[in-house]
Image (cartoon, grey):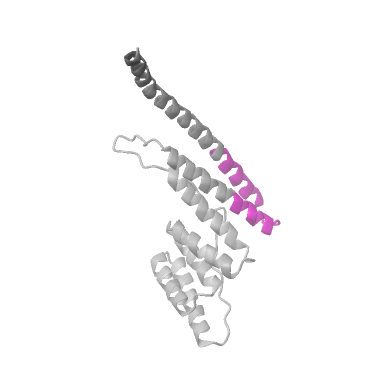
Amino acid sequence: MKKILLLFTILFVSVITTACINNLAIQELNNKAESYMDKGDTETAICRLKSSLDLDNEIYQTHYNLAVAYNSVGNYEGAVEELNKVIELKPDFVDTYYTLAVAKEALAYKIIEKQADENGVLPELSLDDIAKFNDKASDTVETYNLYLVKKPDAPETDQINAKILELNAKIKEYTDIYDSKNLENEKKLQDEVTPIDEEKDEVTE
């Protein structure tokens, strides 16, 4: 079953403009992008938002809106990149941290949600996969917590705390698996080395 990551709907942010012609064009492009998103035409919305950034790459709302669009089509790497840009431009825009946590969480689960083969058998996770998941999941927890610190009265606090508990449980589960696999690998290595050492002893005698 696909994990539901969105705790609540992330809406587009309106671009505040002045009388500048460039800003009016940016406003129009963002409005059109929102309209396309509402119609389900996310790819066209993304094109409009990129055109808006070509006019002015320093408007944080456009970067945020592009991140929302990327999240909706599963381009979580692109969303993270845009949201980090938002934080550079407008670190006090609190919703960024929630949206960033959503994208990071999706990237974490993407590592461990392997596709089954034709026989329905799931491939075994490697130690590298487990380590990457734990790193990204821990980063996600930190980002959710940062959002709650910056917005202590967030209406979805209980839902986010439940999500944090779930992630921490997963991190513990995969840490235990990692330690077990590591121990198993070390034992195998010892078993492979031991016979060789015994042969050397026999030759010496």
99 vs 118, left or right, is right
Region rendered in magenta: 142-170
Q: Residue 122 magenta-drawn?
A: no
Quarter residue 147 falls in: bottom right
159 vs 178, left or right, is right
Q: Is residue 4 above or below residue 185?
A: below
Q: In the depicted view, which residue is nearer to us: 52 or 184?
A: 184
Q: Is residue 70 above or below residue 52?
A: above
Residue drawn 50% across the image and 65% down it? 82
Residue drawn 46% across the image and 76% down it? 52
Q: Is residue 1 visible?
A: no
Tally of numbered tags: 0
* Image coords of residue 55 (percent x, y): 46, 80
Q: In the depicted view, which residue is nearer to us: 4 or 129?
A: 129
Q: Residue furthest left?
A: 118
Q: Is residue 81 visible?
A: yes
Q: Main secondary structure of the magenta part?
A: helix
Residue drawn 52% across the image and 43% down it? 134
Residue drawn 55% across the image and 61% down it? 10
Quarter of the picture holding the N terminus: top left
Q: Residue 166 magenta-drawn?
A: yes
* Image coords of residue 119 (percent x, y): 30, 34
26 vs 93, left or right, is left
* Image coords of residue 178 (percent x, y): 49, 34
